[in-house]
Each structure stands twice: as C-alpha cells, then as structure tokens.
Amino acid sequence: MIRQSFFERNLRYLFPLPALIFVVVLMVFPVCYTFFLSFTDWSLTSGKPLNVVGLKSYFDVLKEPRFLEALGRTFYFTFGAVIVEMILGITIALILNRAFAGKGVVKTLLLLPLVATPVAIGIVWNLFYDPTIGILNYVLSVMGLPQSGWVSETKSVMPSLILVDIWQWTPMITIIVLAGLAGLSSEPYESAKVDGANARQVLFKITLPMLMPTILTAVILRAIDALKTYDIIYAMTGGGPGYSSENLNILAFKYSFEYFRMGQSAVMLVFLFIVVMGFSLGVMRLRRAFEL
Amino acid sequence: MKTKNMFVVLLVLLCLTVSVFAQGTAEQAKPEIRVLLANHPYGELLKTKIPEFEAQTGIKVNYESLQESQLTNKLTTEFATNSSTVDVFMTRPLQEGLMFIKNGWYKGLDKYDFNDYPSNSVDIGRKDGVAYIVPLVTEWQVLYYRKDLLKKAGLTVPTTFAELEAAAKAMNKDGVAGFASRGKGAAAVTQLSSFVYNYGGRYLDGGKAVFDSPEALEATRFYGKLLGNYGPQGVTSMSWENIMPVFQAGKAAMWTDASVFYGQIVDPSKTQIPASDIGIAQLPRGPKDDSPFIVVSWGMAMSAKTKNQDAAQKFLDWATSKELAKEGMLTNITMARDSAWADKEVRAIMNPGLVETQAHAAKNGYPFDRPFMSSVGQARDLIGEVIIESINTKGTSTKLPALAAEKAKAVDDLLKADDEYGKL
C-alpha cells in the first residue's frame, strides 16, 4: 500500500476549505450572531453592556406599528414589482423570440438598466421625479394631465419606487425566459400544428406550461431580491416621506445605525430572514410540482 | 511527502511573519495616525493643510473623508466592535456626543487649553468636569431672502413672524415658492427648533419631552402653515440638500436654514441668482422670544483607544489651532474660537450679514437645535412625524395635540430607557 501524505489523503476536503471558511465567516456566523443579538437588549445609546433578555425585543418590535407597516410594505413592493415584471418580461421575451433585423441591438438596449448601479439609477430617477424641476411633471403638464408628487408624496411614493424596480429588473426576467424558450423542444409544437391548434392554444397549453420551471426560477430570484430591496429606496427616499416607503431592510438599518438599538434591529432582520426563507421554500416546492 | 507538508506550513508562517515585521518596522520609523474627517468645508480645508503638518512634525496622517451620517456609522461600528484604529476624528456634539461619552469612546482632553472658546460651547462636550470635544464650527439659524422679489412686492425684510407670513404670501407666485425650509421629518427638527424657541417652547426641559406644550404646538402649527401654504412642492421629503438647488434656481423667495450655506448660495458657479440679489437676515422674532439656535455643529475629539497619544494630541492641537480657525473664517466657515471673530483681517473680509446675525444669535440664541439626548436619532424621527402632520394639513390638524402628546411620551420612554429621564 502506498503511504499517502495527510495532504493528499484529504485533498477533497482541503480544496473546498477556503470557500467553506469564506461562507462560514461571512454568512453563517453573521446570521447566527444576528439570531443571538435578537435575544439581547443591546443598545448603544444606553451605554450599558448587552443583556440577554429572551423574547423581550421580539415583543417590543411586534408592538411597534412601524414594523408591521414596513412588513406590509415589503410584501406590497415585492408583489407589485414582481408581478408586473413577470408579465412584462415574459411578453417581451415572447416578442423577441423570433428572428428579426436588429434583434441583437434590441437585446443589448434592454440589458442596459440591468447593468447600471442602483444608487446611480436612484439619483437619475429622483431627477425625473422632482416635482418642481423634474421632467416627468413637465411631460404631464405639457399633455394637460395633473401633476404628481411622485416620491415626495405619501400616496404615490410606493408605486413610484415600484416603477423604478420594474424598469430595472424586467430585462432580467426577459433574459431568463428567452433562455428557457431556447431550450424548449420543438416536438410538441410540431404535433400541435398537425392537430390544428391556434396560436393562443399553443401559447397557453404548450409554451407557458413548459416554461413554468423557468418562470418560477425567475420568480424566486427576483422575489428574494425584491424582499431585500435596500439600495434604490435608500438612495431615492431614505424611507420617506415620513416612514411611508420604509421596508424591513430600511427599517432595520435605521434601528441599527440611526437609533443604535441593535437588539430590536436584529429582531427585524430575523423576521426578514424568515420571510425570505419561507417564500423561497414555498416557490421551490411549487417548482418541483411543475417539473414532473 | 512529509517535506511537502512542511513546505506548506513554512509558507504560511512566512506570510504571517513578514506582515508582522512589516508593521513593526513602519511604526518605529515614523509615527502614524488615522484621522476621520467629515466632508464639511472645514474637513476640506484640513485636507489641503495636512501635508504641511506632516512636513513639520514627521507624523504620517492617514485620513478618510466621509459624509456626516456615514461618519457616525463608521465610528460607531468601529468603536462598538472594539476594532477601532481611529486616533482623531470630527464629531457632532449634539448628535452623537452624549452617546460617545456614555460609552467611553472619547478621550478626556485634560491638556487642552479651552480659554479661547465660549464656555457654553465647551460645556456641551463635558461630563463630570471632563471636557471631551474641542468645538470647531458654529452654526445659527438665519433667513436667506431674495432682495429683488422683496422689493418687487413692496416689502421690507420681515422682522416678526407675522411679517414673515405676509411676505411669504405676497411672494408665493409665478412658480416661486414664498417660503422654504426643511420639511423632511427628522431633518426639519433643527429648523423648527428656532420657531419653537421664539414661541417660548422647548423640545426638552429638565430631561423631559415638552414639545407637546401649547407654545411648541403653536410653533409647529405656524411652521406647517407656512410650508403647507407657501412651501415648494414635495416639501415633506426635502432637507437642505433638496432645498438649496431650488433656491439657487430662483424657485424660492425666502429660505431659512443654518448659516453655513451662505457661501454656497452666493457662489456664482452654483447659483443662477446674482449675489447682489441674495440677502441674509436674522430669523424674525416670534411672539414670545427672539432666540434662534446657535450650536456647535462640529467638534474634534480623540479616540479613547488611540495608541499614539502624543501624535494624536499634536494633530488635535494643530487642527483646532487659532491659525487654522482664521483660515477657516477667511473662507466663510464660521468657527467656534472667539479670537477668530475678533481678528481684524477676518472682520474686513467677512460678509457683514454673517457677522451681524452671528452677533445677534451669540447674544440671544439657544445652544441646542435638537433634543439633546443619546437617542436623538429616534427622537428626531418622532418629532418629525408631528412636523409632517402639521405641514400636510397646513397647520390646521385637529389631531396635532394628541399626536404630539403621544410622541412626547415615546421620547420620554427613550429617555427612561437610556437612564436620562429628568436628568439632562
């Protein structure tokens, strides 16, 4: 028997080790530490060392109306954005899924919002949205329509933010769906043609059902991101006017870095974690059902 | 095969030791300090002067320049996690001073000579007889106005709140807002403060929240009435960074904010209005008082964890020196040192409007522009809710007293949680 060195015997453990260490240090540890903090009353403004207080921070947070509103807004933003993005993204993909002159150019143009920096996008959209000197209100007034406060008014701030998200992320859905479309086998279409199915039947009975796993993957990816949205909202409104565009992530940020109530902030992040986790598991289960 | 193992171990050890030695030798050669600055005009001034300091003292200064709230975040995170390597930093006494003192993050400045500073400006950064913050920059509330529009309306500079309202009404036309001030909840708290004082109210009194008092409520209603009726559109989401461009674009006739922005609104490269049309006046007096805020907006402090105390002390002394204070004044930065204001050269150049309003505020003003407490961030958001309600209803909200009482109780709860209730 050849004597192998420790190094060679354990190669399969040693090579993934850097990646594993990376994940543990930067993902597993922070998540566990956040869970730990959520059971403490750590607050920098009190100047006292942290105490483990069990579920007290959880009760404090659940009593806070801002938290419940932010939770609702997190879902509102996610569903509002993802549903429209899916409809638009799939439609655009179906339109693009044929040969036409300039297809490459159109695809490249579509990709542009996707590669832009969220904060830069936020600043540019804020200029569009500015009620006094912005272009959108100018366009509305030229068309004789009533002006809007866009992100500066409570009632219009969430739809305005969702619009930016849709503008930025619809292309991603289009790209994913286009990839899915390219991978569909042509046989069902041929037999549908033989059977005399019309275009509508082909779309709803063949294309969409076969695309479902792809679509659900896109939903998971997009929804996880939308639930955790931070950059665009922070850059555009900082959660305002008042608290009217605060989602869970923004609220948790304020609690930790403006209020310095780390315990309560950790509780909010635990809830966000549960929401994202629960949502992803649910959609993944749904996806499995379609994969049969 | 053993040799291969040994080789890997040796390589790792080598990497570790090399970096340790590298650090060791650098420290011996030249003292090095890390400084955090705000991207405030004074921070910018320091940046240009740091090479001179390095040449004079042989101390290497590694500085970073951050936006004010990011500066607080960075300092807090580093201090709270005990991983800070900061030696000297700019700090906002009213925003974070109490919390930093409480957590023991500032080093006591027992060697510093505070004789050239107004004593109340030093007291804000003092606890149990120990001073922790050197005041750098002061700010007070002023009224910026458009001389041309005021003249066109046949009015003179408002000196009372009634005249202020009349002027706002008269000039609110042709796409120009009659009056602008911060409306964005928490950010508006500092600007509302002078209105509250001029109505005879306070945010806190004896460590208890009193912004639901009739005087404070009246002030909040008046502020909401002005901004709701004559303010720019979307004012409840506007802080100074949103209002300044509106004023610079000629879309606001009057604007009340801190004195610090004067330089920028008369800078011809940034504003579309000729400087000769822009005036600066003291905030009009209210029904009860004539007491705008005048605060130490920035100070400088040393970290309690500094490993280079001598170098850090040298830098602090230099960065807060008389000479640099004078340089600051010459570029329109309103410094905290008394000597800087007395300097003849400065007085010859300084804008008379700034000098007059400063003299008025220094004499009559109140040294806080926000509730002075550790949980000031959260308290500002709570007061901000009351301000937004008032603006949205143009000051007429019937819910205002109940809302203010509810928020005052919430602020009291914060004071209690931080062990400050009834004590400040």
Image (cartoon, coloured by chain):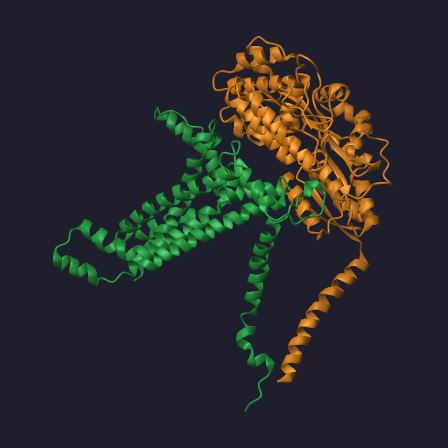
Q: Is residue B128 left or right of residue B76?
A: right
Q: Position of residue B361 (x, y in %)?
A: 73, 21
Judging depth in this view, the residue of B354 and A9 nearest the camera is: A9
- How many marks are shown on the rendered structure? 0
Shade of chain B as shown in the rendered figure: orange
Judging depth in this view, the residue of B382 and B388 nearest the camera is: B382
Find the residue positioned furthest to the top: B154
Q: Is residue B154 above or below residue B104?
A: above
Residue B393 visible, this orientation: yes
Judging depth in this view, the residue of B270 and B172 nearest the camera is: B172
Tell me the quarter of the picture where residue B269 sits.
top right
Residue B267 visible, this orientation: no
Q: Quadrant of the C terminus of chain A?
A: bottom left
Q: Is residue B49 above or below residue B137?
A: below
Q: Position of residue B178 (x, y in %)?
A: 54, 17
Q: Position of residue B353 (x, y in %)?
A: 70, 20
* Residue occupying the point 55% across, 10% down: B153
Shade of chain A as shown in the rendered figure: green
Q: Is residue B93 left or right of residue A74?
A: right
Q: Quadrant of the N terminus of chain A?
A: bottom right
Q: Position of residue B84 (x, y in %)?
A: 71, 51
